[in-house]
Image (cartoon, rainbow, N blue to C red):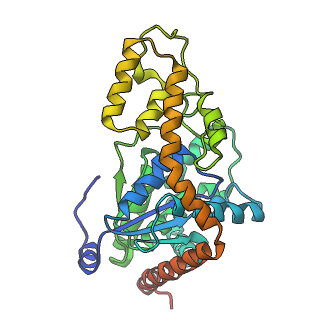
Amino acid sequence: MVVPARSRLKERIMAERPLRILSGIQPTGSPHLGNYFGMMKPAIELQEKGEAFYFIADFHALTSIQDRTLLRENSKRMALDFLACGLDPEKAVFFRQSDVPEVTELAWILSTLAPLGLLERCHSYKDKVAKGMTPNTGLFTYPLLMAADILIYDSHVVPVGKDQKQHVEVTRDLAQRFNRIFGESLVIPEPLIREDTAVVPGLDGQKMSKSYDNTIMLFESPAQQRKKVMRIVTDSTPVEGAKDPDKCNVFALYKLFAEPVEIEELAARYRAGGMGYGEAKKLLNEKLQRYFEPMRARREELAANPKQIEDILEEGGRRARLIARRTLDRVRSQIGLA
């Protein structure tokens, strides 16, 4: 984590309350193993380390979803899955992004300070254009809304993957620009890059992604999960031949679930030969099923009481909006709005 000199505002706010952590996830469908190990699991662990604010990024999802029923169902499903995986609403403020409309006002204010070139350089936009996607304005200004998400809660730390680090840097740049022009009003956040988070391989060895259709979903049926595990691409080394665990997609996934001693034992069996990939896949499936079994049971309990989930989101939105309102009032006062 990059730790710059703290501003007076940050020092004062940190003296008043614990470290504040912020993260969001888009409701683009059922989460897969890549989503879980890349964002959800680290977020759940961090709820023990400070004051966590986690939101379902339904405003952001509008750049790709224009079906109201789908958006609503995806948001409900994401809340259900996140809670089933261990997010604790007693320890983290969990809410829908759209329940805090103040974030869009702050995004507009930031847009008046953002140089066009700053957004044009953002790699997420450039990558999508390079792939032939016809971008909408929302996709282009995505970093501004993300910056508002971070700044409106006076966030100290933003856990992100390396591919999102640039957006936090944009946030820092805009906050510093605002503070220089109008006076210190916005906390300068710091990115928390999880260097130990490996890329989760999909069934074909590429990064696990819905766009590649190579995913294992967290809560699809055990039979479906097993079927997908058995489809994982491997090389053509015969059963009796020695195998390199570091070049095997099955082994890479197994490491996510197994204890260190189990990882070493399986690696030794790979190198010794005499074990086929089919057996390795069976071991992976056993670990996968055992790992998610308690979460699957918890999900069934939560799904039976949808009002409980809605109550959690509404209460989270209320708490988040109180903080957002205070920040926005501070910003409006500094720039001269009533």
Q: Position of residue 142 (x, y in %)?
A: 57, 58
Most distant residue in the bottom direction? 338
Quadrant location of residue 157?
bottom left
Q: Which residue is rendered at x = 43% and y = 87% of the image?
A: 333
- Left or right: residue 310 versus residue 266 is right
The number of discs equals: 0
Q: Give residue 80's quadrant in the image.
A: bottom right
Q: Nearer the viewer, residue 102 or 129?
A: 102
Which is more toward the observer, 335 or 320? Answer: 320
177 or 23, which is in the foreground? 23
- Quarter of the view holding residue 58: bottom right
Q: Determine whether, in the image, residue 151 is placed left or right of residue 316.
A: left
Asked if residue 271 is positioned above or below residue 58 in the image, the reply reads: above
**In the drawing, does residue 9 fall left or right of residue 278?**
left
Residue drawn at x 51%, y 91% is: 338
Q: Position of residue 144 (x, y in %)?
A: 52, 63
Residue 11 location (% of width, % of height): 23, 74
Image spot of residue 246 (x, y percent): 40, 23
The residue positioned 57% from the left and 48% from the top of the image is 218
Q: Is residue 203 visible?
A: yes
Specify whether residue 122 is in view: no
